[in-house]
Image (tube, helix red, strand yellow):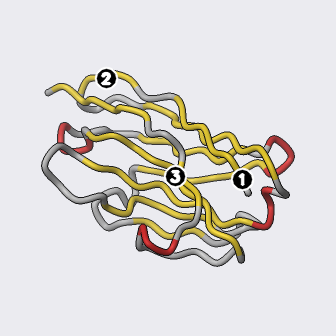
Amino acid sequence: QVQLVGSGGGLVQAGGSLRLSCAASGRTFSRYAVGWFRQAPGKEREFVAAINWSGDVTIYADSVKGRFTISRDNAKNTVYLQMNSLKPEDTAVYYCAAREGGGIRRYPTQYDYWGQGTQVTVSS
């Protein structure tokens, strides 16, 4: 198993930036692909970005493409989500998730382990 702890959320004005971190412990983290998802009140959890086991393949939701960057440092067992040019519609609880096998996927049901979530609030 792998345990995930997300952090880095907070309150920021529109146009600002935040960097989320997802720290992993447990089995060899480099074997896992990692995704970021978010869930706003009253809405379903939605895909944000994902990165494969080695960090050389990434995918993004259209709504964040060009503004968010996902990266990983396997030596530190950590995945990052750099969020720039934030908008009020980015407000949500952000979750990181990991899946065995290393390949990236877009759907929450395809991930095996989840972090506890970190709140991101963007004010207008």
Give the residue drawn at x 49%, y 39%.
Answer: 116
Pointer 3 residue:
69
Local SS, label 1: strand
* Residue 32 sits in quarter: bottom right
Amino acid type of the residue tagged 1 in the rendering: Val
Q: Earlier in the sequence, mark 2 or mark 3?
A: 2
Give the residue drawn at x 76%, y 48%.
Answer: 73
Q: CA distance from mark 3 to mark 1?
A: 23 Å
Callout 3: 10 Å neighbours few (<14), some, many (20+)? some
Amino acid type of the residue tagged 3 in the rendering: Thr
Q: Horizontal and vertical percent for residue 15?
A: 28, 32
Is residue 20 rendered to the left or right of residue 98?
left
Q: Where 5 sits versus 111, above or below?
A: above
Amino acid type of the residue tagged 2 in the rendering: Val
Q: Nearer the viewer, mark 3 or mark 1?
A: 1
Pointer 2 residue:
12
Q: CA distance from mark 1 to mark 2?
A: 30 Å
Pointer 1 residue:
2
Local SS, label 3: strand
- State which quarter of the image contains the N terminus: bottom right
Callout 2: 10 Å neighbours few (<14), some, many (20+)? some
Give the residue drawn at x 51%, y 52%.
Answer: 69
Q: Horizontal and vertical percent for residue 119?
A: 36, 32
Q: CA distance from mark 2 to mark 3?
A: 18 Å
The label on residue 65 is none
Q: Horizontal and vertical percent for residue 117?
A: 44, 39
Q: Earlier in the sequence, mark 3 or mark 1?
A: 1
- State which quarter of the image contains the C terminus: top left
